[in-house]
Amino acid sequence: MIRSRLTLLLLLAAAAALLMAVVFGETALSGAQWREAFGDVSSGPGEVLWQVRAPRAICALLVGAALGLAGAVMQGLLRNPLADPGVLGASATAALAAAGAIVLGLAALPGVVELSALGGAALGSTLLVAFAARVRAPEALILFGVALSSFAGALTALIFNLSPSPIATAEVMNWLLGSVQNRSWIDVLWIAPGLALSGLAAWGASPGLRMLSLGEETAATSGLPMARLRLVALVAAGLATGAAVAVAGVIGFVGLAAPHLVRATVRGDPARLLLPSALAGGLMLAAADLLARLTPTDQELKLGVFTALVGAPLFALIAWRAAREWRL
Amino acid sequence: MSLVELRDASATLDGRTVLAAVNFVVRPGELVALCGPNGAGKSSLIRAALGLLPLSNGEVRLGEAPLQRLSHRARAERVAYLPQERRIAWNLPAEEVAALGAPFLKPGEALAHARAALAEVDASHLASRGVAEMSGGERARVLLARALAAEAPALLADEPVAGLDPDAQLLVLDRLKTRSRAGQGVVVSLHDLTLAARYADRVVVIDGGRIVADAPPSEALSPQILGRVFRLNGRWLDAPEGPLLAASR
């Protein structure tokens, strides 16, 4: 009951954020321009509304939802409230693969950068789960994730270092900061199926995520096909992270914060957390993008910078709370 | 008829032999206590019986079937497991934790089983409370309820009373004894030899991965075994509540 009310509330809030993102922008439209925008989509105001603001807002919403979902799946899979694609390095490996593709000049080929990001996220997620299967201590996993993230970051820096073209370097840099600026309906077509498939996979793996709450050995003897469910969950997290990074670059902390914000309303159940976490992530990023756009600065604030500024203190807070729980 | 059987089972862990040609059987209606010093192989035997520890030799049979030929679900339907680890990752309500013992039932039915199991361990009042807000003893009862909710013919419990106060220890063993009297085959690994002697129908003593005694408590925990395996100078006193071990080093 509480959960369905929360879902409804989050849906309404996300719809409101979407509406505000389309209504508000650098250019204020008059009443006549609004009528023109709805009457003729190819008119100037129509272009602003339907080709600039709408795809950008929808991208922000769906990327946030993908990150919220990925965070919820990773936290369930690793039984750790600090798990998140950014903290644990899956975003960094996705970014590394995409940066490599850009510098190698493959960005001109449609879909190559996006597919590279997906592959990089899959690789990072696989390494994480392989480590988690051998080492149970949550602290050790966080350290491994930090190491993975640092190593992928170092390789990305190496790419910068050795890149022959300053244009490609600037392109990678711009992309690494994370943004949904100038995203089109093509980008929506990348993120939407990725998110849908990831959601389906996460839903399929959800009984396994719930069982993992009791630990690896209990889950292994529960009768559920845990190896398969773990793999499906891994695919879900990797796909959602990869699709989000492919479309918007590196945006940190949404995957960490979204599950945290709604966990109490589902009494901690990792299976029932998935949908509210995705909705909360979408709402957070749609609102963050609107704020980033409307903040009066000479250079528009990059979305990834904005979320990191808000998310890093939150990470510290969650780490503090989690450390208290580990003492149980 | 056996519920769980290890035949000539050997296993190694990090190059160390943890089980050496072990023959072990659990039948319906008996409570078997598994005793031995730290590192003797009690947990390894239980983990091997569940398929969590691969064997280098021998086989495990659940009912009439070799464990390796059974699906995950078929294994879980034959044996329930209560591990020593009591950490629960999230603050789930007790009844939802207990319902995880019956993952193949419809959610409503699983919850009904869970509530019945919680009542069985005197924990109905904890049903909607989050496990992170509970004491260690309360959480142990909830996890026992999860294992009971599985309703498997055999139940293997690895040190189910470790770290519990005396009242909680007696409650846990009382409930496991009741289950064995109702026909379930129950195995508990125990360090408290007085509790083993009081509750077990049969005691299996393991040392260095080998079974050194498999007999009724008075025989398996004889002064000779107490001296040889546990390095204790011990004797049994008769008390109205059951045998009581008086021991010194």
Image (cartoon, helix red, strand yellow):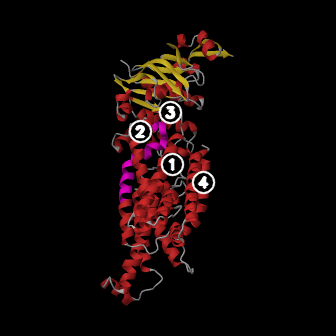
- Location of mark 3 (residue): B83
| Residue B114, disc | 2
**Pair 1/2: label in front:** 1
Q: Secondary structure at mark 4?
A: helix
Q: Residue sitting at 37 percent across and 64 percent down?
A: A192
Is the residue A323 above or below the residue A104 in the image?
Answer: above
Q: Secondary structure at mark 2?
A: helix
Q: Residue furthest right?
A: B249
* Cα separation between marks 1 and 2: 34 Å
Residues at discs 4 and 1 both on one chain: yes
Is the residue A275 above or below the residue A328 in the image?
Answer: below
Q: B129 left or right of A318?
A: left
**Pair 4/2: label in front:** 4
Which quadrant is the N terminus of chain A positioned in?
bottom left
Is the residue A27 above or below the residue B199 in the image?
Answer: below
Q: Position of residue B185 (x, y in %)?
A: 42, 23
